[in-house]
Image (tube, rainbow, N blue to C red):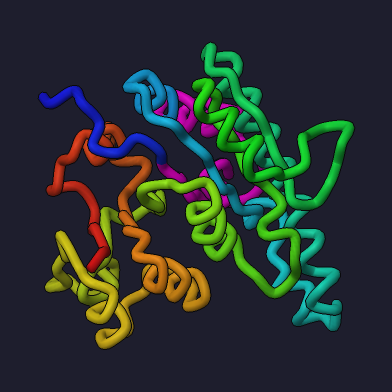
Amino acid sequence: METNPVYKRIILKMSGEALAGDHGYGIDPDRAEEIGEKVKSIHDLGVEIAIVIGGGNIWRGAQGVQRGMAQSTADHIGMIATVMNGLALQDALERLGVTTRVQTAVEMKAVAEPYIRLRAIRHMEKGRVVIIAGGTGNPYFTTDTAAALRAMEVNAEIVIKATKVNGVYSADPKKVASATRYATLNYNQVLTDRLQVMDMTAFTLCQENNMPILVLNLWSGDDLKRAILGDLTVGTLIKD
């Protein structure tokens, strides 16, 4: 197998649900350790990594809004949840010997660094994994948008969206047996066919800045490592 990574610096976007246990909520230490091992496998290749993590395993703002909560309040609770996830993932990585820093757009100086673009870049240059929490620091924006924004800010080469599905399909593969996986797509195809990749704000930001997006299954063996090594049979690569 090829051992030279095709990307030097990446943004890895994962949902908060990646840390959840079998019940779909909370933080499962075993899941955190499993993710840590996957991240370590690509860190060991010399790849510079920043991780943007969601908070849906702890709080979903939409549920609060449905009960009458202000959108800003609901979103700020979600931002705080992402910091909790970031600390759990940091602990898992540190125990695996990977030096890690948590930065957050919502300042919590006692537990994490504030997000500072040049400091994040410097950490990565020194071989540290940077976990970026707090979303963009603003309500009404998803962590998908945060991932796209941070990718541009730290000069990443690609946004890797780690999901439970091996790429983008022509239809929901759980509902349509004949659904086929796209190996590659361009931005216009995604828009024309209304394919679900990221939220529209995040996707448009990537399109306007020619930021490639790779959608893959985080939990499928060593797919993440294979993708980093240039295996095009893994996931769906979206770029012009």
Q: Quadrant of residue 29?
A: top right
Q: Quadrant of residue 141?
A: bottom right
Residue 218: x and y in percent read: 37, 43
Q: Which residues are magenta?
A: 10-38
Look at 47% across and 70% down and name the residue there. 205
Residue 96 colored in magenta in the image: no
Give the answer, above or below, for where 141 lies relative to 221. below
Of residue 109 and residue 24, the one placed in the foreground of this image is 109
Please identify the quadrant where the N terminus is shown. Answer: top left
Of residue 128 and residue 163, the one placed in the foreground of this image is 128
In this rendering, the count of numbered labels is: 0
Farthest front residue in view: 118
Please identify the quadrant where the C terminus is shown. Answer: bottom left
Q: Quadrant of residue 90?
A: top right
Look at 47% across and 78% down and name the residue there. 200
Residue 59: x and y in percent read: 72, 58
Residue 10: x and y in percent read: 41, 42
Look at 47% across and 32% down and name the residue there. 35
Look at 24% across and 58% down and name the residue there. 237
Give the answer, above or below, for where 173 lies relative to 95. below
In the displayed structure image, the side of residue 69 where residue 219 appears, left or right:
left
Residue 25 colored in magenta in the image: yes
